Image: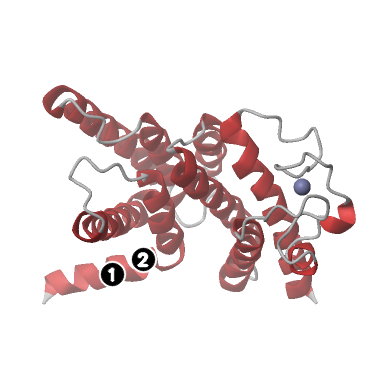
Amino acid sequence: MEKVIIIIFGLIVGSFLNVVIHRLPREQSIVIPGSHCPSCNTPIHFYDNIPVLSFLILMGKCRRCKARISMRYPLVELFTAFSFWLPYHFYFEELPVYAGFCVVFLCLLIALALIDLEHQLLPDELTLGGAVVFLIYAFFNPMVTPIAAIAASFGSALLFAGLYFFYLKVRKIEGLGQGDIKMMLLLGAFLGPDRLVIAVLLASFAGLLVGLFFIIFKGKNLKLKLPFGTFLSLGSYISLFWGHHIFDAIQSLYRI
Ligand SMILES: [Zn+2]
């Protein structure tokens, strides 16, 4: 029963995340007006706004104008529900508060990943707002000491800022966005140094693979811009749960 409530709650929050992902980069209010069809502007009734179910019943089309509704909406809802279930499964019994903060962290990652993918933008509300919340939580986080979390947060942001200015001065391109620097404040504050290193490694590796794919198969050149925030979100998502295992595995490789 508990699990069902967690998942339903996750679906509802996922529906809210869809609103954040759509409106925040367009600088629209997240609260008002209520949901409306982006094509015909008709307000969406509550019974047409039930996570996943309404999409299936309406077969992915607006009731009024029949415009297609993006698959992203039900997918974000389902993935958010999964992101509620994962921390519940791993941590809820022993560390319920930590599990709650994991959920908040994952929701931020989902929003950041999709906004960066679509708009090449990481809103300050999410990166800096999240960083403040998780820097305060660093003093209560059972997984990382406050000093380690604060060092990881500011240290990595400084490192990224250094890289940013290096690219700008030496290569005259924006290799990283300023949003990536602010995002490191958030990631470091919650993940701590070990899992942050793994998150950045995973992000770089995934970025490299996708970049190579586009260069080889889509004829893009090396100036290709990739949304690094999306890869950082992916890396952090994996690292939050499995980063320690990966970190230990890498360390044991060196001991042989
Ligand atoms: Zn419509």
SS for callout 2: helix
The number of numbered discs placed on residues in the rendered structure image is 2
Image coordinates for residue 190, horizontal then vertical, percent: 47, 48
Of the pair 18 and 197, the residue shown nearer to us: 18
**Mark 2, residue position:** 244
| Left or right: 131 as drawn, with respect to 228 | right
How far is mark 2 from mark 1, CA to CA? Answer: 6 Å
From this viewpoint, which residue is outermost toward the top?
A: 169
Q: Amino acid at mark 2?
A: His
Image coordinates for residue 243, horizontal then vertical, percent: 37, 64
Q: Residue at x 58, y 65 (%)?
A: 87
Q: Amino acid at mark 1?
A: Asp
Of the 4 image quadrants, the one containing the C terminus is bottom left
| Left or right: 49 as drawn, with respect to 92 | right
Q: Is mark 2 within 8 Å of ligand 1?
A: no
Image coordinates for residue 165, horizontal then vertical, percent: 22, 25
Asked if marks 2 and 1 touch (Cβ < 8 Å), the reply is yes
Image coordinates for residue 29, horizontal then vertical, percent: 71, 30
Q: Which mark is residue 170?
A: none
Q: Residue at x 64, y 65 (%)?
A: 78
SS for callout 1: helix
Please say if 39 is above or below 236.
above
Q: Residue at x 59, y 64 (%)?
A: 79
Q: Residue at x 27, y 53 (%)?
A: 204
Of the pair 10 and 208, the residue shown nearer to us: 208
From this viewpoint, which residue is outermost toward the front?
A: 65
**Mark 1, residue position:** 248
